[in-house]
């Protein structure tokens, strides 16, 4: 039961003035988040052109900077298909990384998810299985990968809360029926961030917050940055214990 901080995601620089987009900024921001209570960090590396990248030169310098700034903190990356926009290029990039993340998220909605998961396993990188729909959960069960993942992400993109509850409960029901007993990290996006943080705390699941998912604090005010979002989530978790 942890709070993970997702410090940037696919957001552009105009989303928030403190969005960290280069290795140095990510390292400084990551250290501030760890000081605020983050147990782990999830990052989207950027190339020299500022665009998301899985290329070794982008991943290696980002992971190295974060390891130096946040020793002992688990660091994860995304393998989203949109980043390289080519499955073979994604697989080749993973095979070429020198500075390995501790884990990487894989979206089960994406066609090449099984191949990406296999590539990560071959490198000894933990897998976060990202489930955004009941169909994603059913696919994970069919692939029989439940025992081979670090954790399961229930990550909801629906903005209407009732619809988001329905999807998250449906995913949880599929996992329960299949007897898939892996750690779960639940998170929402924008309007559903804080309701899902509270739901995770109630269920003794992990959660995540950060500028990838939204920039508002529980009271609706714009956060000063990732550390403030992290501190707010940690406070909710501590209050629930």
Image: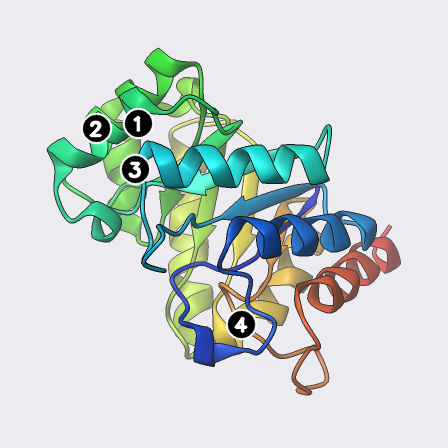
Horizontal side, residue 86 vs residue 171: left or right = left
**Cβ atoms at labels 3 and 4 below 8 Å apart:** no
> Pointer 4: residues within 10 angstroms few (<14), some, or many (20+)?
many
Q: Secondary structure at mark 3?
A: loop
Q: Which residue is at the front of the view, 123 or 71? A: 71
Residue at figure coordinates x 12%, y 42% from the top left? 86
Query: Which numbered disc flags the more N-terminal residue, 4 or 1?
Result: 1
Mark 1 lies on residue: 94
Q: Secondary structure at mark 2?
A: helix
Position above or below: 56 against 25: above
Mark 4 lies on residue: 214
Q: Indicate the quadrant containing the N terminus: top left, top right, bottom left or bottom right.
A: top right
**Cβ atoms at labels 4 and 1 below 8 Å apart:** no
Query: Which numbered disc flags the more N-terminal residue, 4 or 2?
Result: 2
| Spatial CA span between label 2 and label 1 | 5 Å
Asked if residue 129 can be seen in this view, the reply is no
Position above or below: 138 against 221: above
Q: Nearer the viewer, mark 3 or mark 1?
A: 3
Asked where in the image residue 54 lies, by quadrant, the reply is top left
Mark 2 lies on residue: 91
Query: Which numbered disc flags the more N-terminal residue, 3 or 4?
Result: 3
| Spatial CA span between label 3 and label 1 | 8 Å
Residue at figure coordinates x 20%, y 44% from the top left? 110
Mark 3 lies on residue: 55
> Pointer 1: residues within 10 angstroms few (<14), some, or many (20+)?
many
């Amino acid at each position: 039961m942890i709070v993970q901080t997702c410090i940037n995601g696919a957001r552009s620089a105009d989303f928030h003035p403190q969005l960290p987009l280069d290795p140095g900024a990510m390292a400084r921001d990551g250290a501030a988040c760890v000081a605020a209570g983050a147990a782990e960090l999830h990052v989207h590396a950027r190339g020299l052109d500022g665009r998301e990248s899985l290329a070794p030169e982008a991943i290696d310098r980002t992971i190295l900077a974060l390891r130096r700034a946040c020793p002992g903190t688990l660091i994860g990356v995304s393998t989203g298909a949109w980043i390289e926009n080519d499955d073979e290029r994604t697989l080749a990039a993973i095979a070429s990384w020198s500075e390995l993340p501790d884990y990487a998220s894989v979206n089960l909605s994406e066609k090449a998810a099984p191949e990406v998961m296999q590539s990560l396993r071959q490198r000894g990188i933990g897998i976060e299985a990202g489930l955004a729909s009941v169909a994603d959960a059913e696919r994970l069960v069919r692939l029989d990968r439940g025992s081979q993942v670090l954790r399961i992400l229930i990550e909801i993109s629906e903005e209407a809360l009732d619809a988001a509850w329905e999807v998250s409960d449906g995913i949880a029901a599929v996992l329960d029926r299949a007897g898939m007993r892996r750690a779960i990290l639940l998170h929402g996006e924008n309007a559903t961030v804080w309701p899902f943080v509270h739901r995770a705390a109630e269920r003794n699941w992990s959660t995540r917050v950060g500028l990838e998912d939204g920039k508002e604090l529980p009271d609706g005010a714009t956060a000063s940055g990732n550390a403030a979002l992290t501190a707010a989530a940690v406070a909710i978790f501590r209050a629930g214990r």
